[in-house]
Image (cartoon, helix red, strand yellow):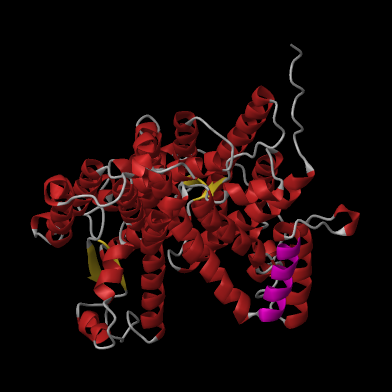
Amino acid sequence: MSAQPAPRAVVRGDIDGFFGLALDNLVQLLLIDGLCRHVLGFSDELLYGHVMPGVAVSLVVGNVYYARLAMRLSKESGRDDICALPYGINTISLFAFVFLVMLPAKLAAENAGVPDSSVVAWQAGLVACFGSGLIEFGGAFVAERLRSIAPRAALLSTLAGIALSFISLGFLFRTYAHPVVGLVTLGVVMLTYFGKLRFKGGLPGGLVAVCLGTAIAWIQGLAPVGALPEGGPVLRLPIPVVGDLLSALTGPHGLAYLGVIVPMGVFNVVGSLQNIESAEAAGDSYETAPCLAVNGMGTVAASLFGSCFPTTIYIGHPGWKAMGARAGYSTLNAAFFSVIALSGTLAHIAWAVPVEAGMAVVLWIGLVITAQAFEAVPRKHAPAVVLGLLPGVAAWGALMAKNGLRAGGYGSPGGPPFSDELISAFQRSDTFITGAFALEQGFIFTAMILSAITVCIIERQLDSAAYWAWAASALAALGFIHAHRYTPGDVVMSWDLNTITAGATLPWAWGYALMGAVFFSARWLTVSDEPSAADDPPD
C-alpha cells in the first residue's frame, strides 16, 4: 500500500480560522494588558518584559503541538478535513487569577507596607498559574475515565451554555450597540459561513469582515482607540523567572490561594475535556491524555517564563472546522502572537483595530457551538441539553446583575457594598438573586451534572442518576459548587475550610443528597407506564 501524501501545512480555510482564533486570543491579550496595568499596577518592564514573553512561550507550546498532531492524524487517516484543536489563554482563569489571587496579594502587600506591591501580586499569579498547570497535567491521566462515564449531552451542553451566553449574547449586545459595523460584518459572516458563499477573487470571509469592520469603525469614530502609542517595536526575549517562582512558592502564596487554584485547575481540566469531546462530535478524534498533558505543560511553561495566565484547549473547534481550518491556522496563530507578545506591538494593534471589527466572527462561533450540542446527541436527549444550558446562562445573568449594581454605585468608594441586603431588595421584584449567585459558582460542574442526571433518567439508569446527584452533593459540601461570599465589590467563590466548617454549603449538599435518594428509591416507589428507553428505536 502506498504511503498517504503529507497534508498541506496551510490551506485556504486556515486563513479564515486564523482570523477568528487570532481575534479571540487578541481579546485575551488586550484584557491582560488593561487589567495588569490599570488594576494591578504592573510597570511596562514587568508587563512587556516578563508577562507577555511568557504568554508567547505558552501559546507556542500548545499551538505548535496541536498543529503537528492534526497533521499526523490527517496523514494516518488519509483525510484532508482534520482540524487542529484551538488553544489559547483561559478567559475565566484570567479574571479569577487577577481578582481572586493577584489583587488580594497586592492589597495585602500594600497594607503591610511592601514597597513594590505589584511584584508581590505578580509572584502570587505565578504560583497560581504553576499550580493550575500541575493540576491540568495530572488530570490528563484520569480525564479519559470521566469522559467515558459522562454522556455526550453533559459535555456538549456545558460548552453550549458558555457559547450561548458569554460569547453569543455578549457580542450580540455589542453588535446592536454599534449596529452599522455590527450588522454589516454579521451579514458578511452569515453569507460566507451559513450560506456557504465565497467572495470573488477567493477573499476569505473572515478577512473581508475584519477589514470592512475596521474601515467602518474608522469612519464612525470607533477607531482609532485612544492615543497613538509612543515608540516602535522592541524585541524582548523570554527570560526564565524560576527564582521568582521559587521565592513565591516558599512564601505566603503557596497555600493562601488554594481555594482559587484547585477549583480553577479542575475547571480547566473539565473544560478542555469537553472541548476534546466537542472535536470528536465534529469528526476529529484526539487522544485525551496527551492533549490534556500538553495543555498543562503550556500553563507550567507560562509560569516559568513570567506569565500568570493559564492556557487551555479552546472552545470553538466545530466553528473553525466549519470555516475550513485545518492545521495551519494553529501554526499561524503561534507565529502571529509570538511577534505581538515579543515585540510590544499589542498597543498599536489595539489602537488601530477595535474589537467591533471582528466580533461577528466570534458571534458565529458561539452559534455553531450551541447548535452542535443539539445536533450531535440523540433527539431524546434534547431536554438534557436544555437543562445543561441553564447554569451557564444563569452565571452570565449573575455577571450582568453585578455589573448593573456596580454601574449604580455598589462596590465603589463611598458607595454601598455588596452584602446580604441585596437578596431582599431583589426579591421584592421577584428576582431570587441568591440562586443566581449560587449557580454562578462552579457552574461548569453544575451544568454537566444536571445534564448527566437527565440523560440517565431518560435512559432509565436510575442508579447512575443517583450517583451523579451524590457526586454533586460531595462537590457542594466541599465548596466546589454554589458556595459564595460577599466582598465589598463582588460576589465570589468561597472555597475554604471556614466555609465548610461553618456549614454554609450544607443546603445544597443536602438538596443533592436527597435528590439522589429519590432516584435510588424510585425502583421501589414507581412503576413504568411506557416502554423502556432501551427498547426505543435508534434516532
Residue at 36%, 62% (x, y): give it.
391
Furthest residue to the left?
502
What's the residue at 32%, 79% (across, down)? 411
Q: Position of residue 503 (x, y in %)?
A: 9, 59
Examine the image and state in which quarter residue 493 appears: bottom left
**Residue 469, position as x, y percentages in the image:** 22, 49
| Residue 421 image-quadrant placement | bottom left
Q: Residue at x 22, y 80 (%)?
A: 423
x, y percent for residue 13 = 75, 46
In the picture provided, is 30 more to the left or to the right than 339? left
* Circle count: 0
436 left or right of 403 in image: left
Comparing 306 with 66, the one in front is 66
Instruction: Spot the residue most to the top.
Output: 1
Q: Does 302 appear above or below 290?
A: below
Can residue 111 be found in the magenta stretch? no
Image location of residue 194, percent across then percent down: 70, 59
Residue 123 appears in the rendering: yes
Closest to the observer: 122 or 475?
Answer: 475
For the stretch drawn in magenta, what is the main secondary structure? helix
The quarter of the picture where the N terminus appears is top right
Q: Which residues are magenta?
A: 179-191
Q: Is residue 235 visible?
A: no
Q: Is residue 336 above or below residue 184?
A: above
Q: Give the residue drawn at x 62%, y 46%.
A: 236
Q: Is residue 478 above or below residue 430?
A: above
Q: Which residue is at the front of the view, 76 or 116?
A: 76
The image quarter in which residue 511 lies: bottom left
